[in-house]
Amino acid sequence: MSDANARISDIVNSNDVVLFMKGTPLFPQCGFSSRAVAILDHLGVAYDSVDVLQDMEIRQGIKSFSDWPTIPQLYVKGEFVGGSDIMMEMFEAGELQQLMQDAQVAKAE
């Protein structure tokens, strides 16, 4: 396992909900990351974020880690959920809310 993969694995497995994104939740740097943050904020769940623009190893590594070509990427309890389009589809269908509930994700403070 590469250093980037080991770091990503540690991040994913150390946090209940992680969003790998461009920018930060307060200052997203792309529309897709902004939409992902808005969905998570609306759900009121606690989540950690990783700004892939600050670390090129993570930015490239996350794509091979998940075998998913785009960012943002959402992980819940160590499992890859998807990008912003999948998040939106799941949210609109009520599936993302159910996933968070089933995973017993903490509420944001």
Image (spheres, helix red, strand yellow):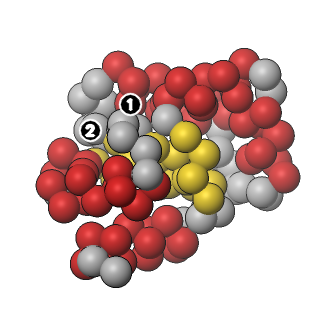
Q: In which quarter of the view is residue 13 placed? A: bottom right
Residue 24 in picture, x, y percent from top left: 31, 40
Q: Is residue 35 left or right of residue 3?
A: right
The amino acid on which the numbered mark 2 sits, given as a three-letter code, is Gly
Residue 96 in picture, x, y percent from top left: 72, 36
At x 79% / y 58%, what residue is drawn? Answer: 104
At x 25% / y 78%, what residue is drawn? Answer: 3
Q: Residues within 10 Å of mark 2 (few under 14, many from 20)?
A: some
Q: Is residue 47 visible?
A: no
Q: Residues within 10 Å of mark 1 (few under 14, many from 20)?
A: many
Which quarter of the rendering shows the N terminus?
bottom left
Residue 99 in picture, x, y percent from top left: 77, 45
Determine which residue is flagged by label 1. Answer: 33
Query: Which disc is residue 74 wearing?
Result: none
Q: Is residue 82 left or right of residue 49?
A: right
At x 52% / y 73%, what residue is drawn? Answer: 14
Residue 51 drawn above or below residue 32: below
Q: In which quarter of the view is residue 92 placed? A: top right
Find the distance from the CA under tag 1 to the CA under tag 2.
Answer: 8 Å
Q: In which quarter of the view is residue 22 placed? A: top left
Judged from the image, the secondary structure of the residue bearing numbered disc 1 is: helix
Judged from the image, the secondary structure of the residue bearing numbered disc 2 is: loop
* Disc 1 + disc 2, Cβ < 8 Å: yes
At x 80% / y 27%, what residue is drawn? Answer: 94
Residue 61 drawn above or below residue 100: below
Residue 28 drawn above or below residue 31: below
The amino acid on which the numbered mark 1 sits, given as a three-letter code, is Ser
Determine which residue is flagged by label 2. Answer: 23
Residue 85 in picture, x, y percent from top left: 53, 24
